[in-house]
Image (cartoon, grey):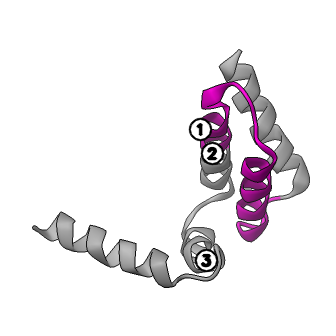
Amino acid sequence: QECLSLIEIAEQEVDHSVSLYEFTQHLDKQLTIEAKCQLITQLWRISLADNEIDRYEEHTIRKIADLLHLRHSEFMQCKHEAVKAHE
């Protein structure tokens, strides 16, 4: 019951959200750089699930990485790790 309640609250939050900032600000404050990089790498791996990276997927991942205050070099390192693991 508690899980269903949390899912319902999350769905309402998503319906009323206007940006990714609302969701990433908490992650930015709580996660280490290493954990942020792991998250971005996982997003890249999800994007590669269909064997291609759509430009909208890349834009969204880049936006999330920016909101997590990752450097461009860290963003690219995450992408390369995900591509290498996918090969």
Q: CA distance from mark 1 to mark 2?
A: 5 Å
**Residue 14 in picture, x, y percent from top left:** 47, 75
Specify start and end residues of the magenta stretch as a single range: 41-70
Q: CA distance from mark 1 to mark 3?
A: 22 Å
Toward which corner of the image does residue 24 lie, by quadrant?
Answer: bottom right
Q: Compare residues 58 and 82 and report the one nearer the observer.
A: 58
Label 3 vs 2, first from the N-terminus: 3
Residue type, label 3: Gln
- Identify the residue at horizontal 60%, vertical 49% (top origin): 39
The residue that disc 3 covers is 25
Toward which corner of the image does residue 1 lie, by quadrant?
Answer: bottom left
In reply to whether residue 47 is colored magenta, the answer given is: yes
In reply to whether residue 10 is colored magenta, the answer given is: no
Q: Nearer the viewer, mark 1 or mark 3?
A: 1
Residue type, label 1: Ile
The residue that disc 2 covers is 43
Label 2 near label 1: C-beta < 8 Å? yes
Label 1 vs 3, first from the N-terminus: 3
Label 3 near label 1: C-beta < 8 Å? no
**Residue 38 in picture, x, y percent from top left:** 62, 45
Indicate the secondary structure of the residue bearing disc 3.
Answer: helix
Q: Is residue 71 positioned above or below 81 on the image?
A: below
Residue type, label 2: Leu
Q: Is residue 2 left or right of residue 18?
A: left
- Within 10 angstroms of label 1, few (less than 14), some, or many (20 or more) residues? some
The residue that disc 1 covers is 46
